[in-house]
Amino acid sequence: MPAPKELDPSKSLAALYGAKLRKLRVRAGWTQRELGDKIPIAHSRIAQFELGKETPTRDVSDQLDKLLRADGDLSDLWGHLQRFPFPDSMRKHIECEAKATAIHKYLSHCVPGLLQTEAYAREVMRAGQPWCAADEIEEKVAARLARSRVLVKADPPLLWVVLDEAVIRRPIGGPSVIREQLAYLLEVSAAPNIELQVLPFAVGAHSALGGSLTLFSFDNAPDVVYLEGDVRGELVKDRRAVARHSHRYDLVHASALSPAASTDWLEKAMEEFGTCEST
């Protein structure tokens, strides 16, 4: 049997909750499967809780607290998690969104959260977090949509987005959902603080093949870069590293279609999905 993964409770509140849960479970002498059976939930969910990758619902957390005789410790931690529902790295990302004067993004896999429609966001959440219950998904969707308010505040940041063609071609939610999403992108790209470009497959190899990245610029602070991962992101502050990532973005930006040509491209893509919907 492989050794359990090491936990670092200092990484986030979710990691602290997971480390506490594992400590209590081990003290009780139960395996993840045995504890899951007592709830009952799949033992894989227990593993996700302990790794800090998922947060249990209130009912499940209260049951865990009672079963493991935590004397309210797990329930108290759960309350703090709900006050800060995003992982630490994502919370820092959201803080940067709120303070930035300019946000430059390259997206390789899906539309950025700031520009997602409700239906599109729901499908992304369902696919990416299949362990979450329906009510949890709705909470996460609402939190994501609320972030877009930063784009319509009194002094909104510049948002310049380069979308890989894969983002447009992938029919997340089916033809009707993706058509609605593309229509929304065309609508918001008319705003004076939003620019949108498409990076076609025909470009071939490019400098951001490693994945999505976001460059934040501020009035009175150095630029920072946020690199997206499959589970959590990384906020990069080292100036040399930020300069290199900024160079990567500039090359992608230069290789993409112009904003005007990108608008034409998106309109044609909408027509194609309309054809798919009617067949």
Image (cartoon, rainbow, N blue to C red):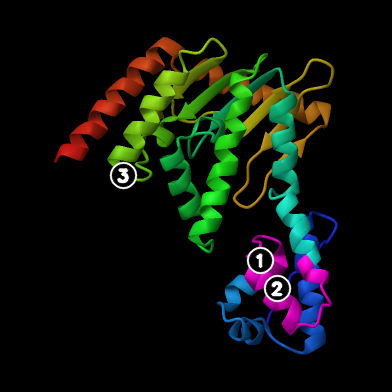
At which x and y percent is residue 133?
51, 62
Among the 4 quarters of the image, the one containing residue 254: top right
At which x and y percent is residue 151?
60, 22
In magenta, the rendered stretch is: 47-75
- Pointer 3 local density, CA inside 10 Å: few below 14, some 14–19, many at least 20: some
Q: Are marks 1 and 2 in contact (CB under 8 Å)?
A: yes
Residue 62: assigned label: 2
Residue indicated by mark 3:
174
- Pointer 1 local density, CA inside 10 Å: few below 14, some 14–19, many at least 20: few
Drawn side of residue 31 relative to residue 171, left or right: right
What amino acid is found at the position of numbered circle 2 in the picture? Answer: Asp
Rendered view: 111 above or below 259: below
Drawn side of residue 173 relative to residue 225, left or right: left
**Residue depth check, mark 1 versus mark 3: number of the one nearer the observer:** 1
What amino acid is found at the position of numbered circle 3 in the picture? Answer: Gly
- Pointer 2 local density, CA inside 10 Å: few below 14, some 14–19, many at least 20: some
Callout 1: SS = helix
At which x and y percent is residue 8?
82, 61
Q: Residue at x 75, y 76 (%)?
A: 65
Q: Main secondary structure of the magenta part?
A: helix
